[in-house]
Amino acid sequence: MSISESPNLRISKSYFITGIGTDVGKTVVSAIVAEALNATYWKPIQAGDLNQLDSGTVSSLTENVAILPEGITLSQPMSPHAAAKIDGVNLELSDFELPKVEGNLIVEGAGGIMVPINDDGLMIVDVIEKFQLPVILVSRHYLGSINHSILTAAALHRKGVKIAGLVFVGEENKETESIILKITGTSVIARIPEVSELSKEFILEQASKIKLQSV
């Protein structure tokens, strides 16, 4: 079903957006999907860049997205487990609870799914498993992205997490995309081109092209 038809739906759509690593375009994709769904956007944990939060970026790039404050903010731009130590915070799985919102919800992760949150083995993937939201996996084309995409999908499958589909960032690469989709058993939600400068117009244009099926 096309996103353009979503205002007529009674069933809410909620997704967890994660990537195959850092700096693959999760925040941009989150903004696009949230705009397409007229959704609420929320980031459970932000480490560093507190003067330029991802929620602020999404807010500045969208028109029809409600923004919630981050669940946990850590001062240092590093792995959450290390940033939490510096801030004197001991993070546990119980610290992460989905907000109650009306309508659609987009949750953006931090880094890749195996990023540690504490020294006891808690990782982002455990938060995803707890939330029980289908995942939109963001994959940007670079040397090694096939390996990273397949490993990420395999780890999600082992946790019993449903993958709604992949968003590929960058110019189309048929060989790369076809083998990732074949091995992971997933489908393409969208291909998002890379641009030198982000704008609200770009986000709105890309949002109009997004299609999601119920998972």
Image: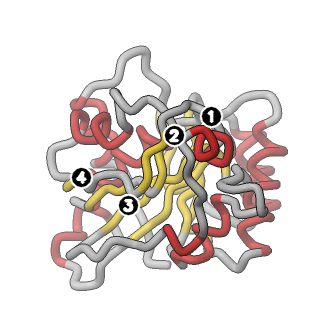
Label 3 sits on residue: 106
Q: Quadrant of residue 186?
A: bottom right
Residue type beneath disc 2:
Ala
- Element type at marker 1? loop
Say which label, 1 or 3, has the lower sequence index.
1
Q: Position of residue 23 (x, y in %)?
A: 58, 32
Residue type beneath disc 3:
Ile
Say which label, 4 or 2, has the lower sequence index.
2
Say which label, 1 or 4, has the lower sequence index.
4
Tell me the crowding category of disc 4: few under 14, some 14 to 19, or many 20 or more residues within 10 angstroms, Cα based: some
Instruction: Please give the name of the residue rendered at 76% of the width and 55% of the height, measured from the top-left corner.
Output: 119
Tell me if I can see residue 60 in this picture.
yes
Residue type beneath disc 1:
Met
Image vertical order of residue 197 relative to residue 107, above or below: above
- Marks counted in the figure total 4
Image vertical order of residue 160 relative to residue 95, above or below: below
Label 4 sits on residue: 67
Label 1 sits on residue: 78
Instruction: Residue at the far bottom: name it.
Output: 10
Tell me the crowding category of disc 3: few under 14, some 14 to 19, or many 20 or more residues within 10 angstroms, Cα based: many
- Element type at marker 4? strand
Instruction: Please give the name of the residue rendered at 71% of the width and 67% of the height, measured from the top-left corner.
Output: 156
What distance separates the C-alpha of mark 1 from that of mark 4? Answer: 24 Å
